[in-house]
Image: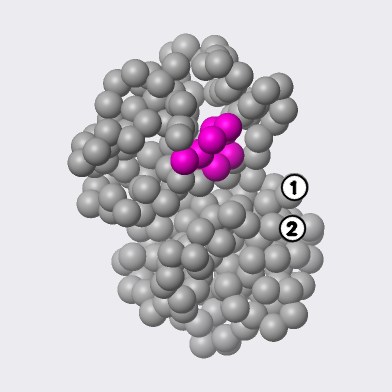
Amino acid sequence: MSSAKILVVDDEPQIRRIMRTSLTGQGYEVHDARSGEEALEAVRAQRFDLILLDLNMPGIGGLEACRIIRATSEVAIVMLTVRNTEEDKVAALDAGADDYVTKPFSMPELLARIRASLRRIPVTGDSSVIQAGDLEINPAARSVKVGGKEVRLTPKEFDLLHFLATNANATIAHTKLLQAVWGPDYGDEVEYLRTFINQVRKKIERAPAHPRHVITEPWVGYRFQI
């Protein structure tokens, strides 16, 4: 059971009611909002551990609300969407979401995504700054700089990059990488992992199409190159 505080943002009362009942039953403290505007007010008023944010809402939509929240907060954000195109998934991650779930979804799937998004890889052992060319990864501060300028990664993107970097020059298999960063519920989501890798490359690589640091090992996994 978890005591994490979750904000459910959806303009459909039935969905808010179902998720409140289901998540409360799992031990989460649940609050809800009917719109992006209400969500922003709630985030300004109190701290949440995770936000479930519907993409399509009247007024301030999910993408805009996500961008506004992410500009000042590292809270975990899971976007809920009825669309399942690559463009929509990338748009959600570009806005700063840690994950996305396509409606309709099963409650076990949503719970797995929540656990994965709440999961943070603790900094253990050597927490010294990792330097690779003009890329600097600071585990203690959970910050990344490229050419001396800070680059904003979502919490999950940071965990992914940090795990690869702490295993520099070693090829990490898809399954191992997914389970290390997202947890034991994951393992077969190779396309899902590819989407996140592409997001990280867009933020840290000078030429994302020809990466210098995050290297693809075809059919096997990924490797961080110093």
For image coordinates 55% across by 61% down, the residue present is: 92
For image coordinates 50% across by 39% down, the residue present is: 208
The residue lying toward the viewer, choosing from 102 and 24, is 102
Q: Dot 2: what SS?
A: helix
Specify the quadrant that holds the N terminus: bottom left
Q: Position of residue 176 (x, y in %)?
A: 26, 36
| 179 to the left or right of 48 | left
| 46 to the left or right of 176 | right
Residue 174 image-quadrant placement: top left
Q: Position of residue 210 (x, y in %)?
A: 45, 35
Residue 205 counted in the magenta span: yes
What's the residue type where badge 1 is placed? Thr
Q: Position of residue 179 (x, y in %)?
A: 29, 41
Q: Are marks 2 and 1 in contact (CB under 8 Å)?
A: yes
Q: Which residue is mark 1?
A: 72
Q: Please say whether residue 171 is visible from this viewpoint.
A: yes
For image coordinates 72% across by 28% down, the residue present is: 149
Specify the quadrant that holds the C terminus: top left
Task: Give the Cα separation between the discs numbered 2 and 1.
Answer: 7 Å
| 178 to the left or right of 212 | left
Residue 65 image-quadrant placement: bottom right
| 71 to the left or right of 111 | right
What's the residue type where badge 2 is placed? Ile
For image coordinates 47% across by 12% down, the residue present is: 126
Which region of the structure is painted magenta? 200-209
Q: Dot 1: what SS?
A: loop
Q: Which residue is mark 2?
A: 68
